[in-house]
Amino acid sequence: MGIEISETDRYYQIIIPISESYHDKSVRNFSDYLRLKAISAKSHASEGDIENLSEEIMQKWWNKNKAGFSE
C-alpha cells in the first residue's frame, strides 16, 4: 500500500502507512512539520519565543551529535 491523498472542498486527507514512513526521511520530516504547525497554532508563544526555543534545541542536538560529524 502506498501513500494516498484525497481532497474535498473542506480538507485534504493524506494516508501514509507507518511502515513507509520509517524508510523515507522526507515523510518523517513532513509529519514532524505538520505536528509542529498543529502545536504552534495552539500556543500563545510569540514567533521570537518559538525561534529561540528552536535554536536552543538545535544547539543541544549539535552538542550531543557533533562528534559523529568530526573527522
Image (cartoon, helix red, strand yellow):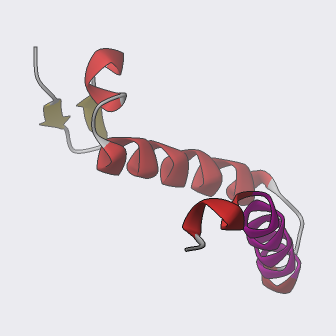
Q: How far across and down, in percent of the image, does residue 36 sit?
A: 63, 53
Which residue is pictured at 11% across the width and 23% down the height? 2
Q: Which SS type dominates the magenta stretch? A: helix
Q: How far across and down, in percent of the image, does residue 50 sit?
A: 80, 73
| Quarter in which the C terminus is drawn | bottom right
Q: How far across and down, in percent of the image, does residue 31 sit?
A: 45, 43
Locate residue 28 relative to residue 57 in the image: left or right: left
Q: How far across and down, in percent of the image, does residue 61 sit?
A: 75, 61
Residue 69 occupies which quadrant of the picture?
A: bottom right
Locate residue 33 relative to residue 8 in the image: left or right: right
Residue lying farthest left? Answer: 1
Residue 59 occupies which quadrant of the picture?
A: bottom right
Locate residue 4 relative to residue 31 in the image: left or right: left
Range of magenta residues: 49-64
Q: Please indicate, yes or no, whether residue 11 appears anywhere in the rendered image.
A: no
Total marks drawn? Answer: 0
